[in-house]
Amino acid sequence: MKNLSLRHKLALSYAAAITLVIIVFAVAFIALQNVQAYFSRLSSVSIPLVEDLDEIKFVGARVISSTNEYLLDVTLGLEEADEKLEQVVESREQYNQTLDSIRSLMTLNIHDATDDGGLVVSIENAGQKLFDIVDEILVMAENGAPTDDIAELREKLEPAEIEFLAAVEAALNEENDELSSSSADVEWVVTTATSTLAVLIVIGAALTVLGVVYFSRSFLLPLSHLHKVAIGLKDGDLKVRGEAVSNDEFGQLALALNSMAEQLEMQMAILEDQLLETEEARAEAVRSDQVKSAFLASMSHELRTPLNAVINFTRFVMDGDTGPVNEEQVELLSQVVMSAKHLLNLINDVLDMSKIEAGALNLFIEDDINLNALLKNAVGTGQALLADKSVSLSTEIDDELPLIRGDRQRILQIILNIVSNACKFTEQGEIKVIARRDKDEIVVVVDDTGPGIKLEDQAMVFEAFKQTQTGLRQGSGTGLGMPIARSLAEAHGGRLWLESEYGNGTKFYVALPIQSESLVPVMA
Amino acid sequence: MMNFQPAVLYVEDDLQSRRLMSMLLKGRLKLPHVTILEDSENFLEHVEALDPKPELVLLDIHVKPYSGFEMLAMLREFEWAQHIPIVALTASVMNEEVQQLRRAGFNGCLAKPIDLDTFPDMLERILDGEFIWRIID
């Protein structure tokens, strides 16, 4: 049974049930057939036969009585004698008919057909013997034989009649035996059928109970087992396995579930491996970033320390702290200071760019940064740059500019960058610094009347180590200022872009979020 | 020239920086009590021996055997140093480093190279209780 599929098990149980039902019907059918045969024989054979046998008894007696009456009439010389003779002949004809009927009915009897034939023959012989005597008497009476002779012959009539009646009685008994035997047969069949049906019903009930128990076991047990396995898998226990108790659909389901669990386990293992690898790669990247950061910090330190000496010793000499210097010496020394400061800016920019490219740019985030102060600072620096030019620098700063979250130094660096950029490139006209709130952002615009930037050069402005022709001619700067400023703005979750028409000035825009959730204050 | 002439302690391992600050503090600003140490060896003894006690301390960070952070902690143990400005004077001015300085409890950070023109003004502001974290001028 274990190797059968559920489909086969079900088919098998249906077949068994159907077979049982067929057997029950067959038994009942056979029993009914027997009962029907019994009753049909009873009505078509037994009853007419018994009637015929009674009839023949009666007819035989009437032949004798008619003969006796005829003899009496003849003796008395009555005219009714002929009538009586006719009655004898009639009765004899009736006798023959009845005998034929009996003969034919007897042959229909199922039991002891030969014996029945014998019974008919014995009736026939006894009848014949009786009618021979009757014939002889009638002939003698017709011929006017002496009364004593006739009386002698009539003496023989009584034993012949008794013999005839006995033969008929025997046939009747035989038929009764036959009937009772048939009825016993039917009774046996009905009893047997009844007990067979009872047994079959008990077997059927038992099988039904067994079937229900078996199927509920073979359904419910594996179902609840597989349910447990599925719950286990759901809860993340990938080690659980189903038991394939049988080879049926449940067994197959268990195997499928197992292979699914194996797949899951394998995939999980792969995922975990990948996670580990990713984790390692990430850790490696972090280590590498740390190494880069440490290198950049060290570079910054190592470059700034000698520049401190170069710039400031030169300043002391230039400022006359160490003794008098002439104009030419001052001029040359101021060139040294300027070049050294330019070198410092270059170093700052290159280090910033390196940090940005190494992903090591860390913002020092604070709340409540006053943009107004930063703008004033930047404008002050810009004004110093414009000292020798006829360019006006004005501001349009919204009075109610909100305090923002960000890196103060870096925001100042961004604004300083675009303001000093405008101051460097604008030879005449004006520069406007505008700051206003726009929804969740603050937008700073630096609008100049400088030479403008050709459309094809505009993208280049934000690319590191590239300068436009105008920028190159201008001769100062590293070409890193704008890319750094844009990266710093983006690091704040903001944007930096420009609008310019060649020959018609340039507008630089910086948009910074007022309160970016992605920026976390250092000293919260 | 500064309005108020504080006693200054400066610890710096770089010879050129020491000369520079000496020229600035003693030469230009003419401060009467300027002590410059070239390392942090026997730092506590040196500090205890100071008279008058410093009213402004400038510390380089990369000093041996005690770093600027350690010297800061040692100084803050003294009653008289609880509320005097202690300022980092360093060439290490990347953001992460400045963050460390702020967390450690410095009153400010002045970057090398220093700007001779603005340096005296910044010292005054720091002495007035302002915290200055100047990286870019």
Image: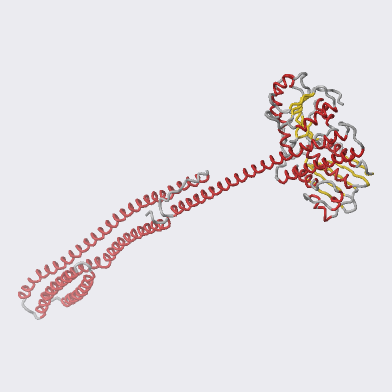
* In the displayed structure image, the side of residue A222 where residue B4 appears, left or right: right
Q: Is residue A183 above or below residue B105?
A: below
Q: Position of residue B86 (x, y in %)?
A: 76, 26
What is the quadrant of residue A319 in the picture?
Answer: top right
The quadrant of the rendering that contains the N terminus of chain B is top right
Q: Position of residue B105 (x, y in %)?
A: 72, 28
Q: Position of residue A409 (x, y in %)?
A: 78, 37
Q: Can see residue A93?
A: yes
Q: Nearer the viewer, residue B23 or A408?
A: B23
What is the quadrant of residue A158 in the picture?
Answer: bottom left
Q: Nearer the viewer, residue A440 or A510?
A: A510
Q: Nearer the viewer, residue A14 or A412?
A: A412
Q: Is residue B96 above or below residue A71?
A: above
- The number of callouts visible is 0
Q: Seen from this angle, which residue lies furthest right?
A: A390
Q: Seen from this angle, which residue lies furthest bottom?
A: A143
Q: Can see residue A383?
A: no
* In the displayed structure image, the side of residue A150 where residue B97 appears, left or right: right
Q: Nearer the viewer, residue A429 or A433?
A: A429
* In the displayed structure image, the side of residue A109 where residue A428 appears, left or right: right
Q: Position of residue B26 (x, y in %)?
A: 83, 26
